[in-house]
Amino acid sequence: MSAFNLTFSSPSTFILYGIPGLEAAHIWISIPFFMFYIISLLGNFTVLFVVSKEQTLHKPMYLLLCMLALTDIGISTCIMPKALFIFWFGLKDITLDGCLTQMFFLHTVAATQSAVLVTMGFDRYIAICDPLRYATILTNARIAKLGLVGLLRAVLLVLPVPLLLRRLPFCANHVILHTYCEHMAVVKISCGDTRVNQTYGLVVILMTIGLDLTLIGLTYGLIIRAILRISSKKAHRKAFNTCTAHICVMLMSYTPYLFSNLTHRFSQVIAAHVHILLANLYLFVPPMLNPIIYGVKTKELRDKVGKYTCRR
């Protein structure tokens, strides 16, 4: 415990501790983490490559898949290199500017991904409820604009987070009990008044995850209502199948995120190493599984990937 109360000569330097209680297992933990990262990069870059090469895939649905792939790459890349330096070489130092930069990009990309998932839900709604107008309502240009709006929202909401943190004093304890600069983990080591930071953090969550989950819930309520009005069982199955991949991706993205965030704020029951492991896994596992899920569930994409794989 003495390591948690070190005093550093430079007030602009933090220590990312890694996973407290599992220091001896850092090397072993790094092996699955590294494998998750490599598989994530291979899968998501494959999606980007295949969609860019195939003219038949230049459609709104696949443009959204490319956006999702870019956010998956961004989320895992924000934290994995530094985490591996901690696990492999014990290089735990990170400057204040480096910490705030990592935090900004991580939360910005995560909020952008949430906006992409909302747009994907809207895409499925139009495809099922108004298929005849799908091509006119959802054009590639309109999808690109929606993506830019999601990115702009994320930047504007997340930018105050590191700016508010910079104004806080950090006294003797500069040890962040985490593998990356998670907002609440940094807030907790400040010796100043953090009420503004905690309140604004909740505002960001409500304006991104809270709002997006509400919109997705409304969208799927309308989708289910439309499906139930269809008399054909075959049409029922087809309609549900078009949503299966999106539902799986949403469950993997939102459920562990909400669990981790709420645990960080309100729960003292869960052991620190369990919480931090889960906080890492929800950033590594979904980016790895998302391209696999869409590759399996989307026949057109699966066939095109198979075409390039067999060619090799």
Image: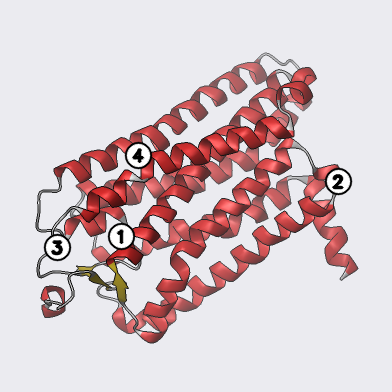
Q: Name the amino acid type tagged 3.
A: Phe
Q: Position of residue 265 (x, y in %)?
A: 23, 48
Mark 4 and mark 2 in contact? Answer it, CB < 8 Å. Answer: no
Image mark for residue 207: none
Give neighbour class at mark 1: few <14, some 14-19, many 20+ (Cα, 10 Å).
Answer: some
- Judged by depth in the image, the label closer to the viewer, 1 or 2, is 2
The mark that comes first in sequence, 2 or 3, is 2
Question: Mark 4 = which residue?
Answer: 205
Its colouring scheme is secondary structure
Is residue 24 positioned above or below 232 on the image?
below
Q: To which residue does mark 1 refer? A: 275
The residues tagged by marks 4 and 3 sit, at their Cα atoms, a distance apart of 25 Å
Q: Is label 2 in contact with label 3 (beta carbons under 8 Å)? A: no
Q: Is residue 229 visible?
A: yes
Tell us which disc is closer to us: 1 or 3.
3
Q: Position of residue 276 (x, y in %)?
A: 32, 63
In the image, residue 196 above or below residue 268: above
Q: Which residue is mark 2?
A: 55
Q: Nearer the viewer, residue 299 or 47?
A: 47
The answer to whether residue 272 is above or below residue 106 is below
Q: Earlier in the sequence, mark 4 or mark 2?
A: 2
Which label was assigned to residue 170? 3
Q: Earlier in the sequence, mark 4 or mark 1?
A: 4
Q: Secondary structure at mark 2?
A: helix
| Image depth: mark 4 or mark 2 in front | 2
